[in-house]
Image: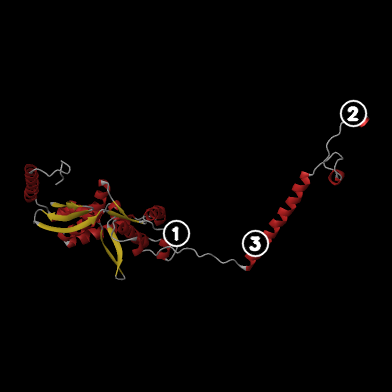
Amino acid sequence: MENPYGNLPAKPAEVEIESSRAIAEVQGQVVMAKKFPRDPVKATDRILSECRRPSLAEQAQYSFPRGGQMVEGPSIRLAETIARNWGNISFGTVEVDRTGNESSMLAYAWDLETNVMARQEFKVRHIRDTKQGGKALSDERDVYELTANQGSRRVRACILRIIPGDVVDSAVAECSSTLKDNIGDVKDKVPKMLEGMAALGVSRLQIEKRLRHRIDTLNGPEYLSLRKIYQSIKDGMATVEDYFEPEEKKAEEKPTATDVAKKAAEKIKGKEEKKEGSKEQVAAMFKGVTPTDIVDPPPEYGKEPKDKEMEIY
């Protein structure tokens, strides 16, 4: 429970009130679930109807390599959609405790009708990985986003553990069918796909290297595969390095004999132009001066002027 008094310990009465409120809320959910039980047929129809939406179908599956094979499955978005439409399920993440720069978290999914619960406990350090190394988080919003992101994958796993497997498989198949029916012209989707991949740090060259051909000739199945890869990286199920090879740095090309000769000729030409320029500068300095003025200096040069009156006498 969050302490409204900051660092002061919560009062026993407040703890009791909060505990009673939580118990009453859970009891109310259980009572409503028993009073209005789900109809599996109608719930499945609702799920399949949601899977016919192209916007959901595009985010419905993930794909990542493991042991030399590609592993595919329903994404976090699809798992949440299935849980909502299946009905009478409570799911989410809870911060159980916080010690220093680490949070103890609980991810859960609870079927209120059958009283079946799937849960996972895990810890999250308040550190965000960056290219410069780990960065400690102090802002409460940053900590919340980090714990929520780490918890979403655990929630997905908990939901899929309590939903019947055939319902999940039907939802995945319906999403695949929706994508194939609504994919349209792949070339029109390439710019948006490249933009999304670039935001994850994947370049066009890396995509083409994986496809082994130019992106301009992308076909439908390849587009669907890239959509799954994008969703997997975005949801944190895998990393860029799991799918794409790092870009190779271009090696410096050694100059050929022709390049060396050309560079030497340009250097000689530059020196000659500089030399001609120096001659022109000297000529400009002595413009208007006769050769006699340069060779024979004036008589008065270097002598003190004499008094003309003394010369007369």
Is label 1 or label 2 in front? 2
Q: Mark 3 and 2 residues: CB-CB less than 8 Å, in contact?
A: no
User: Which residue is labeled 1 in the image?
Assistant: 216
Q: Residue at x 85, y 43 (%)?
A: 297
Q: Does 85 sit left or right of 259 as displayed?
A: left
The disc placed on residue 263 is 3
Q: Position of residue 261 (x, y in %)?
A: 66, 65
Q: Which quadrant would the C terminus be assigned to in this image? A: top right
Q: Residues within 10 Å of mark 1 (few under 14, many from 20)?
A: few
The disc placed on residue 106 is none
Query: Residue type at mark 2?
Result: Glu
Q: Residue at x 21, y 57 (%)?
A: 123
The number of numbered discs placed on residues in the rendered structure image is 3
Secondary structure of residue under mark 1: helix
User: Which residue is labeled 2 in the image?
Assistant: 309
Quarter of image, res 51: bottom left
Secondary structure of residue under mark 2: helix
Q: Position of residue 17 (x, y in %)?
A: 7, 43
Residue 207 or residue 47, whichever sits in front: 207
Query: Residue type at mark 3?
Result: Lys
Query: Residue type at mark 1?
Result: Asp
Residue 76 or residue 81, whichever sits in front: 76
Q: Residue at x 61, y 67 (%)?
A: 256
Residue 58 seen in the current view = no
Secondary structure of residue under mark 3: helix
Q: Earlier in the sequence, mark 3 or mark 2?
A: 3
Q: Position of residue 200 (x, y in %)?
A: 36, 55
Q: CA distance from mark 3 to mark 2?
A: 72 Å
Q: Earlier in the sequence, mark 1 or mark 2?
A: 1
